[in-house]
Amino acid sequence: MDRLEFIGQTYRGFTSSIDDIVNFFDHTMAVYEIVGDTTAANVHGITDNARQTLRIQATFSSEEELNNLINFINNTLHNRKSIYGRNFLVNAHTEGCYVELSVHEEY
């Protein structure tokens, strides 16, 4: 799905602006490109509109898979992801097999 398809399916009677919908889509796609290949046991997303941040909480069945994701974020992406001409900062906080990713646009 691209941005236009997402807007078309989402913007039906909503009171949100199209800019907010596009912003949410871009944040979500940045996260998806980071964690898309992992097999998280449980994923929960939280949008913080006041801070323009998308937080993803995920639980993994193994610490190895979690560590691979953290190493990818820290050492390959260097806590940054570019998509759709926008740059996002990505921070990961872990505890056991649980991670919380915080993604917000870098201005």
Image: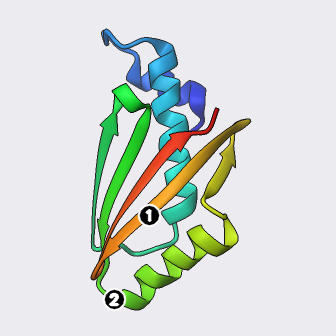
User: Can you name the residue that lies furthest to the right here?
Assistant: 85
**Rendered residue at 27%/82% (across/down):** 96
Give the residue type at disc 1.
Answer: Ala
Q: Quadrant of residue 98?
A: bottom left
Counting the numbered discs, the total is 2
Mark 1 neighbour density, 10 Å: few (under 14) some (14–19) many (20 or more):
some
**Rendered residue at 61%/38% (across/down):** 106
Q: Earlier in the sequence, mark 2 or mark 1?
A: 2
Task: State the image coordinates of residue 22 (x, y, percent, origin top left).
Answer: 52, 26
Q: Quadrant of the C terminus?
A: top right
**Marks 2 & 1, CB-CB < 8 Å contact:** no
Question: Which element is circle 1 on?
Answer: strand
The nearer-to-camera label among 2 and 1 is 1
Task: State the image coordinates of residue 51 (x, y, percent, origin top left).
Answer: 40, 31
Q: Nearer the viewer, residue 25 or 11?
A: 25
Residue with the mark numbered 1:
92
**Rendered residue at 54%/28% (across/down):** 5
Mark 2 neighbour density, 10 Å: few (under 14) some (14–19) many (20 or more):
some
Task: State the image coordinates of residue 81 (x, y, percent, origin top left).
Answer: 64, 52
The image's mark for residue 62 is 2
Question: Which element is circle 2 on?
Answer: loop
Q: CA distance from mark 2 to mark 1?
A: 17 Å
Left of 88 or right of it: where is 66?
left
Left of 56 or right of it: where is 30?
right
